[in-house]
Image (cartoon, rainbow, N blue to C red):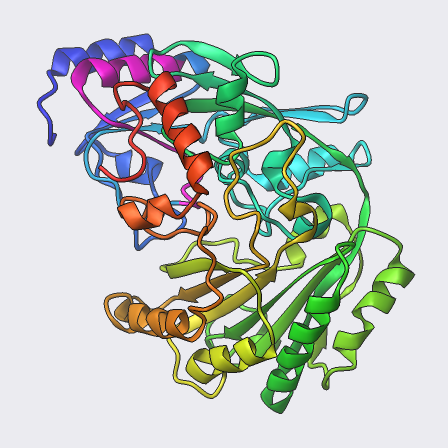
Amino acid sequence: MGIDIEADAVARLRDRVHGTVYVRGDEGLAAEVACFNPAIRHDPDVVVAVADEGDVAEAVRFAREHGLPVRVQATGHGSEAPISGGLIVSTRALDTIDVDGGSRLVRLGAGVRWAPVIAAAAEYGLAPITGSSTSVGAVGYTLGGGLGPLARTHGFTADWVRGFRVVTADGDIVTADAESHPELFWALRGGKGGLGVVTEMTLELVPLTTLYAGSVFFEGDAIEPAFRAWVDWAGALGEEATTSVVLLRVPDVDGPPPPLRGRTVLSVRFAYPGDASEGERLFAPIRAAAPVFLDFVGEIPTTAVATIHNDPEEGAPAWIRGFMLDDFDVADGDALFDVAGPSVDSPFLALEIRQLGGAARRDTRDGTAVGGRDSGYALSAIAADPATFGTTAPAAAEAITRALEHRISAITNVNWAADLTDPAVFAATWPAEVRARLTEARATYDPEGVFAFGPA
């Protein structure tokens, strides 16, 4: 191990927990902390694959005793950088889901992905406000805020949280909600990390069974006019619907749908939580913008919400750069396409723009720590060829940054940020007053810095 821990101490930890304890070199450790992005490989000193809340408390106490920084991983979907050393609490086995249809609340464990939550809620005619990918861990995603395909109509997922169960840096188990530890509750809704280990989250559900939603695809000469039409249309769209657009360079390999393989296409996504005829009317300008290659927009059950974005369910190597934009117009679209459009030899598999605003711009009555509410759009550029990760993808992302620098927001939500160990990146994930309040909350609940988060 990178740090000297006596075998007897590890043995005592194993005796105290119901889950599994791994140390560097143990068979099974790598699989336990494997990430959705296989280009990222963790190398911790110790991993505790917890079986219950008590195991989390024991792991935190052990880490404090031995001077090990604590990090948390559930599904590994959100891992942005390799972890070296320290202790990882793996919460993937905390997978309980309990829906109370009468109160419209769901209690879910820290290892739960969105898909089973959506299915369980649908049995009561309810739905959670989720992310675009239903294979993402619900808790980790929500701790950063959470922007999904219903963002403009229903806001951030964090806005719907009603409570957490948390293991603090002392190894104590507390409830954080509007009445108990309200400052910790505020901080966990958008503050992401450095506050404790969330073991359970209580989320309010919305009465919703169907959407008029999905995606249409354009190819070839239809891409640029469809993109310009989307920019104008999205700018005038009311907050009753949410939309995004993505330029995809689909590789000719197994996995993507056969009609898309080997093609460059533009996909416009749309979600309207209302009557299908009104949704069809709202979306009509996009269908009329250019010849449509494939059309998958229609009335769908909420259980099919993942089909709106069609994010991959299986992990693959990826390099991602994301930031938020104050606004975006046709001139900005032309500037973006000049450096990363379909006629450019770009390393990006996906270049996505999500429209924000609407309910995402309004904080809750009691307030949250979510950063990035004032932005109008979010941009993500994703490269999939590891050969480009070193220089080509970063250089292409820098070209996008230069083209849109007059639009880039001062604040980028933490779930969109890149390397949080970079002080400049970390500082730009929350407004100054929110960042200062989060710093105070972390100092209160983790004065010794047990939970590794942000710059060293």
Vertical order, 350 against 341 (above or below): above
Q: Which residue reaches farthest left?
A: 4
Image check: 127 left or right of 393?
A: right
Please state the total of marks drawn on the protein image: 0
Residue 383 image point, x, y percent: 39, 67
**Residue 72 lies in the magenta-colored region:** yes
Does residue 434 sit above or below 315 in this rendering?
above
Q: Is there any visible trace of residue 449 in the rendered image? A: yes
> Could you say which is closer to the camera, residue 441 or residue 18?
441
- Against 60, is 41 above or below? below
Dividing the picture into quadrants, the one containing residue 406 is: bottom left
Residue at left 26%, top 70%? 387
| Residue 109 is covered by the magenta coloring | no
Question: With respect to residue 168, does 334 lie above or below?
Answer: below
Instruction: Find the magenta span and give its range.
Output: 55-78
Query: Looking at this view, is 355 or 149 the one in front?
Result: 355
Q: Residue furthest front?
A: 433
Q: Where is residue 136? Give x, y as percent.
A: 52, 44
Pick the quarter of the image with the C terminus: top left
Residue 41 shows in this picture: no
Image position, residue 150 (x, y; %): 69, 50
- Pinpoint residue 226: horizontal percent, then vertical percent: 66, 81
Q: Quadrant of the N terminus?
A: top left
Residue at the location (75% across, 59% down)?
Answer: 213
**Which residue sits at x=54%, y=18%?**
182
